[in-house]
Every structure is written in C-alpha cells, then in structure tokens.
C-alpha cells in the first residue's frame, strides 16, 4: 500500500514533466519565453536568408563564366570528337534473322531523323568545298549547313530501310563534332597563299 507521503511526490513529478512543455507560472514554452523564441527564429531566418543569398551569388558568378557556344569541359584529346552510329563498336547480327539487327536499324533510323529534308530546311545552304565561316557575335545562335539524308546514298535508309543489314553489308555512320577552337584564320591564309602561287 502506498503511503500518503508518496502521493504528493508523484503529483510533483507529473507537474514538473508538464511544466517542461508549458510552464503557466513563467509563460515559457519548451523552456523559452515568447521573446526568446522570437529572437531565435529571427536569427535563423536571417542566417538562412544569408546562406541562400550566398548560394545565389555563387551560382550567378559561375554562370557568368560559361559560354553558350563553347562546351565548358572538353575531351582530354585536342582532336574533335567522333561519334559512331549505331552506338556500338562491337556489332553482332545474323542477316537471316531480322530480330538480331533490328536494334541497330532502329538506332540508325532515330539518329537520321534530324537529317530529314523537312528538318534541314531551316539550316543554311552552303556551297560545297568552301569553309563555312560563322560570325563571332556571341548574341547570335550558331548556324549549321544543310546536310540532307539522301547524300548518304545506300546508308540513308531511304532506299534500303534495313541499312544493308539484311544483305550482310551493314552501314556504320561516323559523325565529327563541331570544332570550337579551330584556328581557321591561319589555315585559310595558308590555303589562299597556296592557290595564289599555283
């Protein structure tokens, strides 16, 4: 049986536990007054606004260093990038089983969609054999010369929709990426000098 002396101690423990959340005598919530809570919330609001501003300033400075027309990171090799399609260096297929080469045909077809005549109409018609000089204004978007899919003849996928895979003579396309730091002025001067002496 509990004695009468234990009952006030239990009430005291319960009230001290409740007082840790809200103390009606001092008006504290979780051990802080309303003014203390307001100050700490104001501090964290200013602190996190400062961090967000610092992040935004850092991103703004970083974006100022980027050029829209030149890739920021280039390959380790100075030569231009080369793309091979279909996207595999190891091509295995059986010409009598269309399911074996279907993935290569689909990959070539999706790659050549951007070279359809309707897509290429928006590009410039450049004369063959001449070097295409771009304006060096940074405000203008870079232009591209027209490259029609039909110029690939048998590998265009227009006359042979299987790109030669059904005959055992598959088409493999190589595409050279645009050279962004090509020393064109020196090369063009040398070419003009050679043609003048001939």
Image (tube, grey):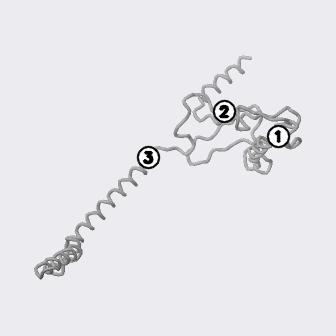
Q: Which quarter of the rendered picture does the C terminus lie within?
A: top right
Q: Residue at x 68, y 35 (%)?
A: 83
Assess whether mark 3 and mark 1 are in contact (beta carbons under 8 angstroms): no
In front of the other: label 1 or label 3?
1
Which residue lies under the disc numbered 1?
A: 156
Q: CA distance from mark 2 to mark 3?
A: 29 Å
Q: Residue at x 59, y 35 (%)?
A: 180
Q: Is residue 35 left or right of residue 5?
A: right
Depth check, front residue: 16 or 158: 16
Q: Residue at x 17, y 75 (%)?
A: 13
Q: CA distance from mark 1 to mark 3?
A: 42 Å
Up/down of 3 relative to 93, above or below: below
Which residue lies under the disc numbered 2?
A: 82
Residue 45 bears which disc, if any?
A: none
Q: Residues within 10 Å of mark 2 (few under 14, many from 20)?
A: few
Name the N-terminal-most of marks 2 and 1.
Answer: 2
Assess whether mark 3 and mark 2 are in contact (beta carbons under 8 angstroms): no
């Amino acid at each position: 049986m509990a004695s009468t002396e234990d009952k006030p101690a239990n009430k005291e423990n319960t009230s001290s536990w409740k007082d840790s959340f809200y103390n009606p005598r001092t008006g504290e919530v979780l051990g802080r007054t309303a003014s203390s809570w307001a100050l700490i919330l104001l501090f964290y609001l200013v602190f996190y606004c400062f961090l967000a501003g610092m992040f935004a300033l850092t991103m703004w400075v970083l974006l100022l260093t980027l050029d829209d027309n030149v890739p920021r990171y280039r390959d380790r090799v100075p030569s231009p990038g080369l793309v091979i399609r279909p996207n595999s260096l190891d091509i295995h297929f059986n010409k009598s089983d269309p399911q074996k080469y279907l993935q290569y045909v689909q990959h070539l077809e999706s790659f050549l969609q951007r070279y359809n005549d309707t897509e290429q109409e928006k590009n410039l018609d450049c004369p063959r054999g001449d070097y295409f000089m771009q304006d060096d204004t940074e405000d203008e978007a870079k232009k591209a010369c027209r490259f029609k899919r039909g110029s690939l003849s048998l590998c265009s996928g227009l006359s042979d929709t299987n790109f030669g895979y059904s005959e055992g003579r598959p088409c493999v396309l190589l595409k050279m990426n645009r050279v962004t730091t090509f020393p064109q002025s020196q090369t063009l001067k040398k070419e003009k000098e050679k043609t003048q002496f001939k």
